[in-house]
Amino acid sequence: MKKLLQRWFASPPQLTPQQRTRLDAWRALPAGDTNSTFDHTRYVVVDVETTGLNLLTDTLISIGAVAVVNGRIVLEDSFSVVLQQQESSGKENILVHGITSTAQREGEDPVGALLAFLEYLGKSGLVAFHVAFDETMIRRAMRQYLGLSFKHAWLDLAYVMPALNRTLMGSHRVLDDWIGRFNIRIEARHNALADALATAQLFQIAIAQAHKKNINDFEGLYDLEKTHHWLRDVS
Amino acid sequence: MSAIHPSEISFITRHAPFDHMELPHVLWMLQRMRLGYYPEGEVIVSPEQGPVDRFLVIKQGMVHGEQSVAHASEADTWLELAEGECFPLGALLANRRVASVYRAGNDVFCYELSAADFRELIGLSAAFRDFCTRRIANLLEHSKQVIQAQYSNSSVEQQSLASPLSSIIRRTPITCPPDMTVRQVLKTMHEQQVGSMIAVDASGRPLGILTLPDVLERIALPQIDLDQPVINVMSTILETMTPQALAHEAALTMAKHGFRHVLVVENEILVGLVSEKDLFALQRVGLRQIGSTIRNADTIEVLQQGAMDIRNMARNMMAQGVAAEQLTQFISTFNDLLTVRVVELEFMASGLVGTPLLNGVCWMALGSEGRFEQTLNTDQDNAIIFDTPQGMTADQVREKLLPIARRINEKLAMCGFPLCRGEIMASNPQWCLSLEEWKQAFSGWIRGGTPESLLYATIFFDFRALYGAQHLAEDLRLWLARVASDNSRFLYMMAENALRNRPPLGVIRDFVLNDSDRIDLKLNGITPFVDAARIFSLATGVTHTNTIQRLRLSAAKMNLPTSEIEAWIDALLFIQVLRLRHHDESSAKGLSEDALDNLIDPASLNELDRRILKEAFRQARKAQAKLRLDYQL
């Protein structure tokens, strides 16, 4: 609890002038256009690994991201970083994501790492599976280390996929269900970059499926997602 | 902090040609690649898209190449590409449109490299360039050299049975005019110390040959007049071959017909003489000797020795790198000789020789023996077809023949051809039938379409006459060709059945393995070709039983490009070589004949063979894709 309080009431982070310039440059970028069709836009599919699944107490360990540009995953346009941890996560957690204590301590300085992520992201729309988790983790880290209130357009495949595949709604809940369904092979599950790649492939499938329903942009999928939220809540 | 996940690198480097490329080149490529998704049925590349703009590697899923009607002669038709495979190489290299439509067979993800980057990579990486421009034929050639090198320790001779006769001819043959006297000829032979003399006409065309054994038999013993023209005592039935013919063909001819010499002739003019002795230097076991031993054998012991010699000879030839086609041809020829002698001896022992009953009996080979594709561990598949003599019923004939057939089956088993576990043997009353009964049985299978009748069709429709009243088998063959080609429902079911057996290729790893982590070369590699060839030949009325002949002959009638067919044949032969080698290695380890199997562990193959085997299986899938196309399966 003490840790949690410290984090909430900590003084705003001190950035170097150089870091400040980088952050301002990112802020100044024109907002992304969520009405462009999928074959003319860049999206960033993201996955994070954390010290645990508790949204309040656990912290961000690594970010993996893959860009989908004009409907295709650009292998080089991908991003992976391990954030330096004050204290390494527990042993059981290490077994999940495979980032050892040494690797955690030798990670990037969180400020630099998050700035690099922002620069990689630009104002492209974000896509994830179970956005609530990834978004909370990233947003909190942004506030803690950059003093940035990170508000960004997110698309949640955990809602989009069942909305596009109504018959699979009940039986397919977690990411593994969907990637299994479409035979997407993932060679290193719970590695942020590998998970992001698998999620990006799922996103490509979603784009193709949406296309058949005449939905061709982020906005359209987002509406679908909201409808599905509502559907799920009332049912 | 841009990153390519190591799993991408490890995936791509598991597949040719990336497994042979330098890592920096692989990374260079990956950095420039995009991953595209194509839902089932979506067109990935098509002629309508214009010159090909990207190089694709399948990360996941199956891609079908469909023949486009406008380019029916194009070689890259009926493709089926699996994980790790690249396309469309030919069109990219030529900077043209593709000829086929490439369509996603299921959910497909492809790595894609722009055409410009593809060309740059070709300049960058020699391994990649090599792969893109090299054909399977080169690979096969390379593999053959490797095999020869592996066996070189056990084979002393430099020359092999695969060399052309032109390289074996030692000196110009001694010739004489046909009207030279016998006396003069004998004198010349003595002076020149040669074992044979050939009479030629004024332009050098051979007319006859006289050999030393002939001197005893035709001149000395009958005490003929030595002043008559030599042509009168010469053998004038001459076996001739061109200088391009291979040593093994000459050896095979000598063994089959019992000749000691083969004349080498170019444009009808005699250019050389190859004797058994010349060929003997190329091999340890004299082929003709084995042949004549078997032909003249009177006891089972001699035949057993002959069977052993056949196996040794096959091993020896494998060591010399004789191609699979010739090798299996050798094995079949000699096994035929052996079987024929066994049948002949038992027929003689039966006391029925010369009776109308035995004059109307034909011994048939079925299955792989029927197709001339026997290996060393083939069990016997045979049957009898007979003509019912007047005044007898088919059952009465059977009653007489079955005990003889039983003895033949047993003798063959003693010679190393295991009894058929499925009882597909002439001693089984079901398979000792009159011509009419065979037609009834065949009709039943063609109409039936049950799994059992389809299975019987695959074994029995490859029948071939071995001994006796051959015309009965020929009758049956012509009848079958007519009936089967008219029955599209039956052919459809045969095709459907054949497609159940899929060549094992890359769904999870490079190969899909069976439970024991091994590949069944016969079932998964040979059978798809054999099945496809049988259906093609039945559909087009080709009466040949050999798979290679069937493919070549039916391809012509089906307007299949020769290059396509030759690629299938190369693939089939390569798998056959691997299989023979596997048998040879297993018997060298002391496994008994009936313990030989067709299962190999791909990990035990060298890199090159593994790559060719993969390509060979891909060809098998192409043959199947053709079936699928023809029968809309």
Image (cartoon, coloured by chain):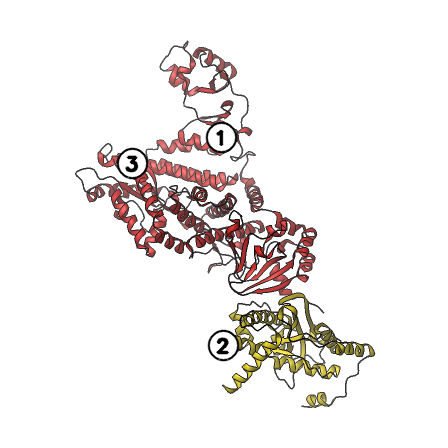
Chain colours: A yellow, B red
**N-terminal label among 3 and 1:** 1
Percent position of residue A167, x then y: 47, 76
Percent position of residue A116, x then y: 74, 74
**Which residue is denoted by mark 1 in the rendering?**
B280
Count of numbered marks: 3
Residues under labels 1 and 2: Cα distance? 77 Å
- Three-letter amino acid code of the residue under disc 1: Phe
Horizontal relation, residue B506 to residue B120: left or right: left
- SS under mark 2: helix
> Which quadrant is home to the N terminus of chain B?
bottom right
Percent position of residue B313, x then y: 46, 38
Which dot, 3 or 1, sits closer to the camera?
3
Question: Which one is in front, B384 or A121?
Answer: A121
> Which quadrant is home to the C terminus of chain B?
bottom left
Q: Residue furthest top?
A: B227
- Three-letter amino acid code of the residue under disc 2: Arg
Can residue B448 be seen by looking at this rendering? Answer: yes
> Does residue B459 lie above or below B196 as drawn?
below
Question: Which one is in front, A115 or B148?
Answer: A115
Residues at discs 3 and 1 in contact (Cβ within 8 Å):
no
> Does residue B37 lie above or below A159 as drawn?
above
Which chain hosts label 1?
B
Q: Which class describes the residues within 10 Å of circle 3: few (<14), some (14-19), or many (20+)?
A: some
